Structures are given as structure tokens and as C-alpha cells.
Amino acid sequence: MNRSQRRAAKKQNPAGGLPSATPAQAPGVDLFALAVQHHDRGELTPAVELYKTILDRTPSHAAASERLALIYLAQGKRDKASVQYAALARHVPQSLGSYVRIVETLKNLIPDLAPAFTNASTASLVYLLKKPGVENCTSIAGNDYFRCALESTVARDVALERWLTALRAEILGAALADEPPTDDELLAFSAALAQQCFINEYVFAVAPDERQLAERLKGLVVDAVAQATTIHPLRLISLAMYLPLHTLPGGSAIAERSWPGPAAAVVTQQVLEPIEERQLRASMPRLTAIGGGVTAQVRQQYEENPYPRWVRLNAPPATLRILDDYIRQQFPTAQYRPVGRRDSLDILEAGCGTGRHALEVTQAYRGARVLAVDISLASLASAKRKTPPALAGTIEFAQADIMSIGSIGRSFDLINSGGVLHHMGDPLAGWCELLKLLKPNGLMQIGLYSAHARREIVAARKIIAKRGYPSTPEGIRRCRQDLFNGPEQFKFMAMSDFFSTSDCRDLLFHVQEKQFTIPEIKEFLTENNVKFIGFDFPRTIHQHHQRVFANAGWSIGNLDRWDAYERANPDIFMNMYALWMQKN
Ligand SMILES: C[S@@+](CC[C@H](N)C(=O)[O-])C[C@H]1O[C@@H](n2cnc3c(N)ncnc32)[C@H](O)[C@@H]1O
């Protein structure tokens, strides 16, 4: 590929920051440029053939996948486009990262679904679900991309949540009929909805009469399990829309039966995987004792509600990251001493939760060797179960308390701890413990709550305390519904954490939360002789802030400027202060 072809391919890559191909997939690169040329000239037939060839060789080629889907959409072939978008989501899960984009794609693929994003009209949803679609579009239930999205990520849209909630109640009614429907598409869609309910931990509202019906269904299924009699797949799947199957008496016996495909996927998710996590939990290495008091309370919260709730790990980046290059690129004017580790990097992920970030870091850095610790065994077991075999040799999960982490006798080039210290009894003491584990020139990235950005959360916590919602699944469900229907639409109600039980508990009901300001952070860094390198943001936001600082003639490393800037823009750290630093 010559330079202008490369430029054209880069310009035309509609997959934004998604990986286009890994180096091992290099044979596809020339073909892609050729495909793009045909595509741009409107020669769709050869473009389609070339994109398909590339995807046969490299199913994770995001740009080819998305371009092919776009051609199908432009040609009005919505079913083919759905299959292609679903393939993209399965091979490159980061394509599901932007919920706005998921919704746009769904509206393009299934015009009949558009009302679900504006109001929850409940006029026979099952009918709507099964209605043959507009031209070149099967029913909503038959849409591969919709099902894939429900199985892969938490639905983060209030109107869609209401629509799905109403649909769930209708499916429950159908499952309780004397002869439940046996239609394959309905079964497959209901299974995707059951998986969505498990992913969001049954956060949808349940009306009292619906709860009674769900209890009746539970009785039928439990009896059938005990007596080893037949269970209709739609009944099992419908029950899985209301509770996780592994919690049923004799639940593990469900996995010993043979089920049709969609029900089998639900059984894997709700019976087999929880069993595997229980086993992993029992064998988890324990590196330190775990403190009592606040630490014990925080641990209890995360044993009950591990964080974050996630399903698919992003595909690895096309080129592996080298820490020094990354810091230079992100913070070109920062004064820091190079870490100097280009081929291997010892990393500590302190408070790794369910491991998403730790695993992403493991697959991002060249030569990464990662120790990921947490106090919650449930979180660690979930992280370990989700570790892809390719990473199993380079990441180690273990239970440890940051307050005692010095006793492990190890040191690291990079220490990450995002969203952890502010849940400790003494966050600054925990921060000092981590600093002691840095190798000379090592770097640290810490995520801390901003008092300015969390002001709405403070207001919501006051409402929660006043109304006395408990931090149980039922209390969280009630609180969410009351907030939906209340006079004030808080900004956090659009955050993904609001849409699953564990993450909502973390967001609004935490047993321990401390917030910080930039002057407090500055004071800590000064006292501990630590150099601030910069704040991390998603790329486009980062570039925006860099421009603002450059135009104003401010140094990007000046924390006083950042403090003033945040006061004028109090939401910029909604996702926490994510700061990079180095010990002097
Ligand atoms: C909000 S979660 C963040 C998880 C992960 N860092 C992320 O950003 O996705 C906070 C995690 O910190 C862990 N944690 C809290 N106190 C800790 C301590 N003293 N030592 C180790 N981990 C701790 C909790 O168990 C929990 O999993």
C-alpha cells in the first residue's frame, strides 16, 4: 500500500478508534485498501467481495466489518447488515462501547423498534416482536444484532428499559399458558432478554401481580426439577428473566439436562459459570490479611455486588503499547523520567474488581506481567473466569488489602488503582502504601472521585437516606424507579452505572465514599514528593482540554489552573480524576 492509499484508508476508516488489524493479520491490509478504493468509487460488488475475503481471514477486522455492514444498509439489506453488525460486536466488543451508537444502529436496522426509544407503548409487544418486519428486515425478535446487544452489554436507555420490562411481563404470561409457544425466534429473543436481565442483575421494575406470576412459574420449575419431569424451554428462560437459575433449589441439576440452543446459553450463563466462579473463589491465592472495620464493610459490599458488571473483553489493540511512548504521546510537555522498560513491564492493578481494566492493561502493554489484587473474592473469581486463555500466563489474580500490600515484597514499573482509594477508610494512607511499591522511575495512575463532579450524587444520597431505601436489590429497584419518575432528571441517570444493580449500588449506595478536590490532591503530591504528569481522558476530550490550555497559555501540568478550570466546568471529571504521576 503506498502512502496515499494508506492515507485514504485511514481517512475512510469508519470504525474510529477500533483496531483495524493486528500485525499478524497483515495479508489483509492491501486488500482493505483495494476494497476501500472500490467502495469509494461506488463499485459495491467488488468491494463486498473484498471485505468478505478480508473477514474470512481476519474476522476481527473492524473497519472491513463495519464498511460491509454499511454497504448492506445502504442497499436496504437490513438482515444482512444485522448479521454483519452482530459479527462485529462479537469479534470486536469495543464496537458496543458507545451506547449512542448502538441505539443509532438499532434504529437503522429495525425501524419498528424506534418507538421503544421514545415511549414504552405496550400495545401487544409480543405481537410487535413477532410482526414480519419492513422490507428486508425480519421481526424484531429475529434480529441478530439486537439479540447480540442484549447478550453483551447492559441496555443503558430508560425508554428501552421500560419497553423491555413490559415485554418481559408479556413473555412471562405466554410461558404460563397451558401450551407455551414453541416458536424458535421467540425462544431465542427471550433467551437474549434473560441474559440481559442477568447482566443487569434484575434491575428492571417488577409489578406486584407480575411478581406473583413469576413466583408461580418458579414453583412449577422447582417442582419439575425435583421430580425430574419435563420443563418447557420458554418456562425455564422466562424464569431466568426474574432470577438467576443457580439460586434455585437443585439449580445445578438444570445443567445436567439437555436444552435447545437458546436455553443452553442461559443455563451456561446462569448455572455453569456461577459454579465455576465458586470453585475459582475457593482456590484464589491470598497474599495478605484483610483489614476489619471499614475495609470489612467495603469487602462485604463487593462480595455481594462485584464491580464492574461486564461481559465481553475488548479485542486487543492493533499495536502493543510501550509505556514511555504512551506518556510522551499523551503528555508531550510533561517533565518526567523515562521508565525505560520497552520489552517487559511489571504492573500492579490495585483493587482490580472484576478485572476488566486489569485484563485490558495486560493485553495493551508489550511484555506486561500483571498482578491484580482485590479484597473481594467474588470479584477476583469473576475476573479469573473471564480471563482469555491467551492472557492467563501473564496475569495473576490474588486477594490482598492495599493497606498491607507492602508485605508481599514486590515492586512495579506501573501501578494502577482506579476508583479504589476513595472507598478506603484512609485513602491517603492507602496511596502512600502503593507509592512504596514503585520501582525507581515507576509510574502510577490513580482514579479518584471529584467533589465537584459528584455534587448530584451527594444530592441523590441525601434523598436515599431521607426515604430510607435499603441497599438491597429491591431497595435499588425502587429507588431507580422513583428517580425515573421524580421531578429532577439527574445527569447520572444517563451513566452506565445506573443500569445494573451492582454498579448502581457502587454509584449511589456505597458504604464508604470520600471525594477529593484538586488542591487536596496537590497537597498530597507535594507532601509525598510526587510529580503530577497529567490527567487522562478519552482521546477527543483530551485533545479539547489540551487546546483550551494551549490557547490560554496555561501549562497542562499546572494543578492550580486545572482547579480553576474545573470550577468553571464542574462536570469535566464526571469519570473521576484519572491522574498520572511519578515519584521524584
Ligand atoms: C469501584 S471498584 C473498582 C474496580 C476497578 N478498579 C475498576 O475500576 O473497574 C473498587 C474495588 O476496590 C476494591 N477495594 C476496596 N478497598 C480495597 C483495599 N483496601 N484493598 C484492595 N482492594 C480494595 C473493592 O473490593 C472493589 O473491587
Image (cartoon, grey):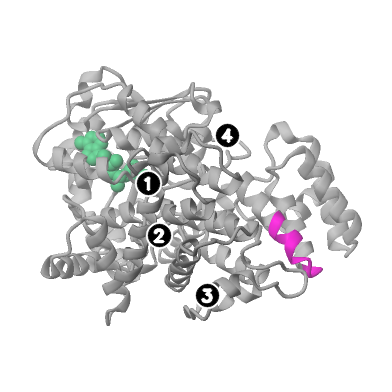
Quadrant, the C terminus: top left
* Residue 320: numbered disc: 4
Q: Quadrant of ligand 1?
A: top left
Q: Residue at x 56, y 27 (%)?
A: 390
Q: Are marks 1 and 2 in contact (CB under 8 Å)?
A: no
Report x, y in % for residue 124.
53, 77
Q: Is mark 4 within 8 Å of ligand 1?
A: no
Report x, y in % for residue 78.
74, 66
User: Magenta part of the protein: which range?
Assistant: 74-83
Q: Is residue 373 left or right of residue 43?
A: left
Q: Is mark 2 within 8 Å of ligand 1?
A: no
- Looking at the rendered image, the disc whose residue lies closer to the viewer, 3 or 2, is 3
For numbered disc 1, what is the local secondary structure?
Answer: helix
Residue bearing the label numbered 1: 223
**Disc 2 residue type?**
Ser
Quadrant, the N terminus: top right
Residue bearing the label numbered 2: 496
- Looking at the rendered image, the disc whose residue lies closer to the viewer, 4 or 2, is 2
Disc 4 or 3, which lies upstream in sequence? 3
Residue 467 in which image quadrant: bottom left
Q: Is mark 1 within 8 Å of ligand 1?
A: no
**Disc 1 residue type?**
Asp
> Magenta stretch mostly in which secondary structure?
helix
The number of numbered badges drawn on the structure is 4
Disc 4 or 2, which lies upstream in sequence? 4
Residue bearing the label numbered 3: 116
Disc 1 or 2, which lies upstream in sequence? 1
